């Protein structure tokens, strides 16, 4: 667990620093500097490029995760794996380019009246998708080499810092919106370039091809993993992005902008989990390849407990401060209050589920995992079709929460059925009760001046939530950390007394 701990700590630091910059960008600056349709354009470009970018990898992300252990051989440049991965990505981009030019006219015609700004800038999907394809491939390869924290630095922190700079340039009127959106697109290429430089410096970047591992049976297995992996990865990205497209379709680009802005607050819950999952997935894959289910079970139990505690704590802080959050945003974003609640709830469910998806798709049941993902994306589309026209962007957030609840419960039942793994104990109920009690007490805290209210309310919520968690020792690592902090403080006070 040493690698997990080190990489998770680094990744979490980068993620939270990036989240702070993202908060400044999304919550403070963009709602005040840009029109809602301009915000919608930025988000729909990112959403569609993520979906098509995942398709453009042609399943190479999952092939890398599952099959790279067979290629791993530093002395022989990992048997030409990087050449193979980039070649597949290049083919994927060629196929997307053909699709783009075949559908470009239709996209422009259907958006010219409802979302004219999207119709004007639809051409940016080409570079966006190109960048996204190769980011997914390069970042996954880099992660399998146990450099996950650098990828988190490049994508979570540096990219948001670059976005901040472009927003400030727009604010100072040094660039107009057209120049802003071009620079915004270019900034997404920076993490890809930096990861490539890191790989070159570590002598892990080789484009020398090698086909000695590609026997008939192995090639058949790679194709199978790619096909089902593509379905899984596409569905995984689509569930987090397709709601923006549906909102643009049923409402307009302005509604997409409002939804995307408030959506950010709900995603804060996932930040610590991302770093842990990035590293844990690598170790889980290696353990499953060696049929070391003891390690898999240990990783699963620890990650589930830690992610449940952190996820619930963040959910309590976000919803407990909902009035303060809405104060930050301009009045037209008021309709997003309950969007924050349901998006945060959906992401809390993901945190509680922890690394269950990594266990399934790293095992021989990756085909079944693809089926589960298809069910999830179909559920989201159906729930959106039912709820979005009736309740607008709130309906879209409810649709996401409902779909995730059904999907995550099904996923856990599948893991117990096939692997007899169940990390959930009485302690998880204690965590949920502690969170619920904190939110009930929050109702009785009077509203104060903005800054004072955030400080007092957050402090009370943290104390009310963490005291029972510490007393019941449901998260032993947290108790150990607190003991170390108390010990160091005592030692420091003794030194100062002398």
Image (tube, rainbow, N blue to C red):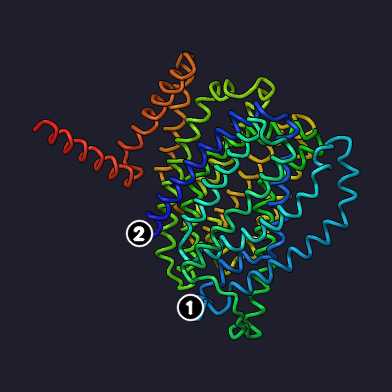
Q: Residue furthest front?
A: 174
Q: CA distance from mark 2 to mark 1?
A: 22 Å
- Where residue 142 sits: x, y (%)? 52, 63
- Relative placement, left or right, of 12 versus 468 is right
The residue nearer to you, when weighing 192 against 314, is 192
Q: Residue 222: which quarter of the image?
A: bottom right
Vertical order, 415 against 31 (above or below): below
The residue nearer to you, when weighing 396 against 486, is 486
The residue nearer to you, when weighing 406 against 230, is 230
Give the SS element for disc 1: loop
- Where residue 85 sits: x, y (%)? 63, 70
Using a 10 Å C-alpha cutoff, classify the residue at mark 1 as few (fewer than 14 neighbours), some (14 to 19) or many (20 or more): few
Residue under pointer 2: 2
Can you say which quadrant of the picture contains the N terminus?
Answer: bottom left
Front position among marks 2 and 1: 1
What label does residue 14 carry, if any?
none
Residue drawn 68% across the image and 48% down it: 185
Q: Residue 164: which quarter of the image?
A: top right
- Where residue 304 sits: x, y (%)? 45, 49
Decide which of tag 2 and tag 1 comes sooner along the chain: 2
Residue under pointer 1: 73
Q: CB of mark 2 within 8 Å of CB of mark 1? A: no
- Where residue 416 sits: x, y (%)? 52, 58
Vertical order, 75 against 406 (above or below): below
- Relative placement, left or right, of 186 versus 385 is left
Using a 10 Å C-alpha cutoff, classify the residue at mark 2 as few (fewer than 14 neighbours), some (14 to 19) or many (20 or more): few
Residue drawn 59% across the image and 79% down it: 208
Give the SS element for disc 2: helix
Residue drawn 40% across the image and 49% down it: 9
Report how many numbered discs are placed on residues in the image: 2
Can you say which quadrant of the picture contains the C terminus?
Answer: top left
């Amino acid at each position: 667990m040493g690698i997990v701990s080190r990489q998770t700590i680094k990744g979490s630091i980068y993620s939270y620093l990036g989240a702070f910059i993202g908060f400044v960008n999304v919550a403070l600056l963009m709602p005040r500097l840009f029109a809602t349709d301009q915000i919608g354009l930025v988000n729909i470009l990112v959403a569609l490029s993520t979906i098509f970018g995942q398709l453009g990898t042609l399943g190479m992300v999952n092939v890398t995760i599952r099959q790279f252990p067979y290629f791993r051989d530093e002395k022989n440049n990992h048997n030409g794996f990087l050449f193979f991965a980039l070649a597949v990505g290049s083919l994927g981009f060629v196929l997307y380019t053909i699709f783009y030019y075949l559908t470009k006219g239709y996209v422009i015609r259907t958006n010219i009246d409802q979302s004219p700004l999207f119709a004007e800038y639809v051409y940016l999907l080409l570079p966006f998708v190109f960048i996204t394809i190769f980011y997914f491939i390069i970042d996954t390869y880099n992660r399998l080499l146990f450099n996950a924290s650098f990828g988190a630095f490049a994508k979570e922190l540096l990219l948001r810092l670059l976005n901040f700079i472009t927003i400030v340039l727009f604010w100072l009127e040094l660039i107009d919106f057209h120049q802003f959106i071009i620079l915004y697109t270019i900034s997404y290429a920076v993490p890809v370039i930096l990861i490539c430089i890191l790989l070159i410096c570590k002598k892990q970047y080789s484009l020398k091809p090698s086909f000695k591992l590609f026997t008939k049976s192995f090639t058949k297995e790679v194709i199978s993993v790619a096909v089902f992996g593509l379905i899984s990865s596409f569905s995984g990205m689509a569930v987090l992005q397709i709601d923006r497209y549906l909102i643009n379709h049923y409402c307009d680009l302005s509604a997409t902008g409002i939804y995307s802005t408030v959506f950010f607050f709900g995603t804060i819950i996932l930040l610590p989990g991302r770093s842990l999952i990035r590293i844990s997935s690598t170790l889980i894959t290696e353990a499953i390849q060696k049929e070391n289910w003891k390690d898999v079970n240990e990783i699963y139990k620890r990650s589930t407990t830690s992610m449940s505690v952190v996820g619930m704590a963040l959910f309590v802080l976000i919803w407990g401060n909902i009035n303060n959050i809405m104060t930050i945003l301009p009045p037209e974003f008021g309709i997003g209050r309950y969007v924050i609640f349901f998006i945060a709830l959906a992401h809390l469910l993901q945190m509680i589920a922890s690394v269950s998806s990594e266990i399934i798709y790293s095992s021989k049941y990756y085909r079944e995992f693809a089926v589960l993902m298809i069910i999830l994306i179909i559920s989201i589309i159906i729930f959106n079709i039912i709820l979005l026209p009736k309740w607008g962007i709130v309906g879209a957030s409810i649709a996401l929460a409902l779909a995730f609840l059904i999907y995550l419960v099904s996923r856990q039942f599948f893991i117990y059925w096939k692997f007899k793994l169940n990390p959930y104990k009485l302690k998880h109920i204690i965590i949920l009760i502690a969170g619920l009690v904190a939110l009930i007490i929050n109702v009785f805290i009077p509203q104060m001046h903005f800054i004072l209210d955030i400080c007092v309310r957050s402090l009370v919520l943290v104390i009310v939530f963490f005291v029972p968690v510490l007393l019941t020792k449901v998260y032993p690592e947290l108790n150990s950390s607190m003991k170390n902090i108390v010990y160091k403080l005592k030692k420091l006070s003794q030194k100062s007394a002398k």
